[in-house]
Amino acid sequence: MYLNRLEVNFENKPCYDIVIYDDFSDLKNELSKFDIENRKICIVTDSNVAEIYLDKVKEELEGLKVFTHIFEAGEQNKHLETVSGIYDTLIFNKFDRKDILLALGGGVVGDICGFAAATYLRGIDFVQIPTTLVSQVDSSIGGKTGVDFKHFKNMVGAFYMPKLVYVNINTLNTLPEAEFSSGMGEVIKHGLISDKDYYYGLFENHKKILSGDIKALADMVLTSQKIKKEVVENDPYEKSQRAILNFGHTLGHAIEKEKNFSLSHGVCVGLGMLAAFDICIKKNKLSEDDRKFFSDLLEIYSLETGTDIDVEKVFEATFNDKKMEAGQIKFVLLNKIGDAYIDRNVKKEDMVEALKSICKEI
Ligand SMILES: NC(=O)c1ccc[n+]([C@@H]2O[C@H](COP(=O)([O-])OP(=O)(O)OC[C@H]3O[C@@H](n4cnc5c(N)ncnc54)[C@H](O)[C@@H]3O)[C@@H](O)[C@H]2O)c1
Ligand SMILES: O=C(O)C(=O)C[C@@H](O)[C@H](O)[C@H](O)COP(=O)(O)O
Ligand SMILES: [Zn+2]
């Protein structure tokens, strides 16, 4: 059943739609506007998603020229060798510039497949079919594609827009709880950076959201998509304000790396945001009550409020952040709940103190 459609503009022109359905039955119909009868399609997915959804999606695309490429699930595999494997499949099956890739899976699949699409033959079309909360609310939108390099997050990549984002909201039903929590990290981020009512609503509606109420989930996914859409439309290449979507990520990405990807992206973003709260409190922009509310919200959604980290190592890793300019980090902070800004004057001591505030012996 059809639930919603958003049109995303890129450089002020309509570029792609984000559609929400409660199943895959309209996938072929949504793809039909791309002349798919005459194109080869390669479904790129990971080992977990393949087991649950690949047959269903192939069934929906019956009659079309469908190929598949499956790689081992996990952030540990978000690297150039996996992309290279996709190129092998495409070359072996003689994919040309008019053919198309479908990224079926979470943010790892979307980022990798999008990067393969951006670079194979200097660019072929791709469609996002996000199956995790992270990917439905965040990674499938806005065209950031790429891979990690030597464990540095997203160090190699490209801005490359999908042709379509097709969300089957019911794929969230099979998502492990920890992965749902990870997505809540990005959802909470959206509220914190641009919509305080949405943020506080995540507390008020937590029982419905956590019980898997499909209406509550679809409303939440849509609200997050609208927030992300607006930001990326205004600044597609992250020249300025798009950086607010990186709230919690400067420290979060560094924590992900230092923990060898043993913590999910959303958990690390949550920790990065909690550390950023420490800096905002020092700057008199947020209060201790705000910190308490946020920390409680993280707990409600089973996100971590502390971890054991080597503060110096994590601090060093932040220097590889993509928001670094002339040795100075562009740090995303909050003026108040629902209002983010970029601060170029965050001192080393404040970052170190902030990291200490989330340090916990385990
Ligand atoms: N490009 C962007 O703008 C952007 C935004 C946010 C995050 N990201 C990136 O996204 C990645 C995190 O994405 P993620 O959390 O989706 O991770 P993921 O793709 O690794 O998925 C998490 C796990 O869930 C499994 N899975 C996926 N869908 C499932 C389903 N419906 N049912 C059961 N299992 C399922 C996967 O196989 C995997 O094991 C990170 O690499 C992060 O850097 C990118
Ligand atoms: O779309 C964006 O812009 C974001 O920053 C969204 C983030 O949630 C996402 O994790 C993104 O991949 C981070 O990008 P990076 O440029 O810091 O690697
Ligand atoms: Zn993120």
Image (cartoon, helix red, strand yellow):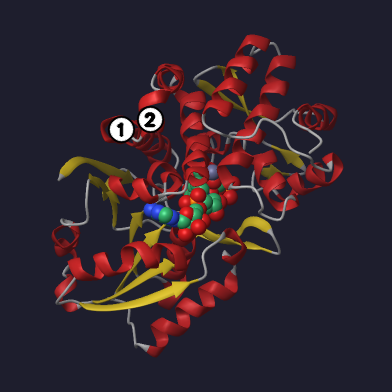
Residue 174: x %, y % from top left: 38, 50
Check contact, mark 2 vs mark 1: CB within 8 A: yes
Residue 254: x %, y % from top left: 71, 46
| Label 1, residues with CA under 10 Å away: few <14, some 14-19, many ≥20 | few
Q: Is residue 143 above or below residue 358?
A: below
- Estimate the spatial distance between the alpha carbons at disc 2 and disc 1, rounded to whole Å: 6 Å
Residue 91: x %, y % from top left: 41, 86
Asked if the residue at label 2 sits under 8 Å from ligand 1, the reply is no
- The residue sitting at 56% across, 41% down in the picture is 266
| Label 2, residues with CA under 10 Å away: few <14, some 14-19, many ≥20 | many
Which residue sits furthest front? 211
Q: Left or right of 348: which side holds 187?
A: left
**Res 159 visible:** no
Residue type of the residue flagged with mark 1: Asp
- The residue sitting at 16% across, 69% down in the picture is 35
Residue type of the residue flagged with mark 2: Ile
Q: Residue under circle 1?
A: 213
Residue 246: x %, y % from top left: 57, 38
User: Which numbered dot is residue 205?
Assistant: none
Q: Left or right of 300: which side holds 332?
A: right
Q: Residue under circle 2?
A: 209
Residue 346 sits in quarter: top right
- The residue sitting at 46% across, 71% down in the picture is 119
Q: Secondary structure at mark 1?
A: loop
Quadrant where the N terminus lies?
A: top left
Q: Is residue 28 above or below residue 262?
A: below
Quadrant where the C terminus lies?
A: top right
Q: Is residue 112 above or below residue 231?
A: below
